[in-house]
Image (cartoon, grey):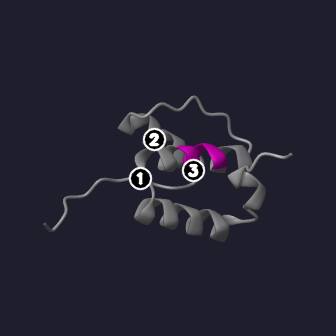
Amino acid sequence: MKYFKIEDYLNDDSDIQALLNIVNNEGTPEGFIECIRAIARFKSIELNLDSDFDSIRKALNSIGYKFVVIPSDI
């Protein structure tokens, strides 16, 4: 039996954007980190990713995305 790997279902940048949107809106922090790892594998980028903000920012930057934190309107 083959294990499910997210990157097997990514074909292009629009798939990556859709995945990031879903995980951002509906996922957990752990799911978000796994999503970043899957995208990096898809793009053949090796990451040593932990859960701190700077590592997440660097990982997203390496795959062509920018991660910023802005104040909420709450």
Identify which amino acid the numbered label 2 is placed on: Ile
N-terminal of the pair, mark 2 or mark 1, is 2
Query: Residue 27 colored magenta?
Result: no
Label 1 amino acid?
Phe
Which residue lies at the image location 45% right of the left edge and 35% below the top edge? 55
Give the residue at x 74% y 43%: 44
Amino acid carrying label 3: it is Cys
**Residue 54 picture location, percent across and down:** 39, 36
User: Relative to 8, does residue 52 appear above or below in the rendering?
Assistant: above
Q: Nearer the viewer, residue 7 or 68?
A: 7
Main SS category, magenta section: helix
For label 2, the SS is helix
* Front position in the image: 40 or 74: 74
Label 2 with label 1: CB-CB less than 8 Å: yes
* 14 and 24: which is toward the camera: 24
Q: Can you identify the residue that label 2 sits on?
A: 56
**Residue wearing tag 3:** 35
Image quarter of the N terminus: top right
Q: How packed is label 3: few (under 14 Cα within 10 Å), some, or many (20 or more)?
A: many
Q: Quadrant of the C terminus?
A: bottom left
Q: Give the mark nearer the N terminus: 3 vs 1.
A: 3
Specify the label residue 10 is tagged with: none
Identify the secondary structure beneath mark 3: helix
Q: Are marks 3 and 2 in contact (CB under 8 Å)?
A: no
User: Residue 63: image x %, image y %?
Assistant: 60, 50
| Residue under pointer 1 | 67
Give the percent coordinates (x, y) of residue 41.
70, 43
* Residue shown at the point (73%, 49%) measured from the top left: 5
